[in-house]
Each structure stands twice: as C-alpha cells, then as structure tokens.
Amino acid sequence: MKKLFLFAAVAALMASCDQAKVNTTDSDKAVDSLENIIEQKDNEINDLMGTFNEIQEGFNIINEAEGRVNMMKNNSESNNAQQNIRENMQFIQQTLQENKQKIAELQEKLNKSSINASKLKEAIANFEKLLEEKNQELESLRNLLAEKDIAIEHLDNEVNTLKAENEDVKIQKEETEKVVRNQDQQINTAWYVFGTSKELKQEGILNKGEVLQENYNKDYFTKIDIRKTTVIPLNSKHAELLTTHPSGSYTLLKDSKGEYTLRITDANKFWSVSKYLVIRVK
C-alpha cells in the first residue's frame, strides 16, 4: 500500500514538472516575442531620430551660413569677399535641397513604421514650413545681393527649379489628401431604408420576401456616415432586419411609446457584411 502511494506521489510530481516545463516554455516564447517587438520599436525610433537629427543639424548650419553672408554683404567690394558669398549661398542652396530630401525620407519612414508618433508628425510639418521659410529667405538674400551686383552663379536656375519642385510637391500632397478623404468617405458610407412590405416592393427592394441585390431604387435609401449615425428611430411597433448584420453589433428595442429603435453598438462589425440596411416595419 505504501509503495502504491509512493508511486502515485512520484507520478503526480513528474506531471507537475512536465506542466511547469510547458508553462516555462510558453512564458519564454512570450518573453522572446515581447523582446523582439521592443527591439523592433527601438530600431525604428533610432532610425527616425537619426534622420530627424540630420535635418535639424542641416537647418543649424544653414543659419550659420546665412549669418556669414549677412556679415560679408556689407563689405563685399573685394573679390575674395564676393567669392566667399557665392560659396556660402551655393552651400545654403545645396543644404536646403538635401534637407528637403531628408524630410521626405523621414515622412516615408514614419508612414512605413509601426509607430504612431503624433509629435513627430507635427515636427515634420514644422520642418516643411521651415524649409519654405528658408527658401524665401534665400530668394530675398539673392535679390539683395543682386542689387549689389554680386552674381550668384547657377543660383537663379536652382532657385527656380526648387520653386517648381515645391509647387509639384504641394500639388501632389493636395491630390493625395483628396484621395485619402474620398477613400475615407467611401469606407465610412452606408445606406439604410425602412418601410412596409408594400413600400419596399414598390421601390423594387423586396420581392417574394427577399431583398433584391440589384435593379432597385437606390435613391429611396438614406445615405449616412457610419461613424456618426448609430441610432435609427423606426417609428413602428413592429420591425425586422431583412439584410444580414452580425449579432451582438446592434440592439433593436422598444421605447416608451412601444416603437422600435435600432441602436448600432459596433459599427465596424455591423456594416462588415453589407453597407446596405433594409428593415421591414408595419
């Protein structure tokens, strides 16, 4: 009897150890997965901040070069001073172009990353604004130097090219934003209708108790934004959803008058099967 009890105890202990190994293995996997996620985030942040710092440094050295030009322009009689001004102006132009490319690179990296950094998005917008301001400052400085008969070789063409490129970027950005708005509107647009069987048949929506998939009067439907419209009063004591919408995503309850009201509790789930809602009332 004692041997039997000892055997059972050993077996239970071994089973416990095996379970502990399984739990430990699952825990190790979870830790490894979490460490990989953290490492990925760190790498993304380091990459983003590296480009961010390069852009910031670019603007810093542009400010320094502008300061040198402003100091020299009042004493620009000598050929040496004029040459230094030309070199600094060309350096400013080149650095502005490099910063423009790095800002676009930073934006692309942020779009592709798993980081939702609103502050960094604001910083990029500020960089773009600062880039435009620096381009305007550069043009003003060029005009001032032209009054002093200091020609900046190749700068006129580069400035005009940069202006055209900035205009193209602005147009592309507006077009992209328009596409995004349209897509967002389409994704969040749905249509609903409720009526008696007779009304729905007259509009070609219902036939032999079933909702038709085409050839019905779409103008009879009410267009809504699913993010905003979540409550639909049906003004009827009898209501039945004829289109398919997942259970648990809505409630159909009577109010104090005994009339039904449809409340959508999970919009994404409710409209996942169909963006058309048909309700039969009496």
Image (cartoon, grey):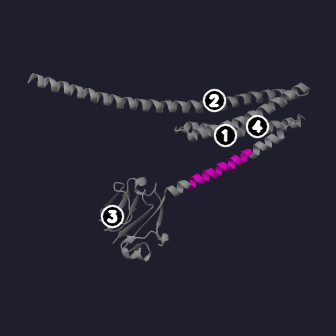
Report the Cα–Cα distance between label 3 and label 2.
Answer: 59 Å
The magenta stretch spans which residues? 165-182
Report the Cα–Cα distance between label 4 and label 3.
Answer: 65 Å
Secondary structure beneath label 4: helix
Q: Amino acid at mark 1?
A: Glu
- State yes or no: discs 1 and 4 in contact (Cβ < 8 Å): no
Residue tagged 4: 137
Report the Cα–Cα distance between label 2 and label 1.
Answer: 15 Å
| Chain-order first, disc 1 or disc 4 | 1
Give the residue at x 53% y 56%.
Answer: 185
| Chain-order first, disc 4 or disc 3 | 4
Mark number for residue 53?
Answer: 2
Viewer-nearest of discs 2 and 1: 2
Q: Quadrant of residue 145?
A: top right
Secondary structure beneath label 3: strand
Q: Give the total number of marks visible in the rendering.
A: 4
Residue tagged 1: 128
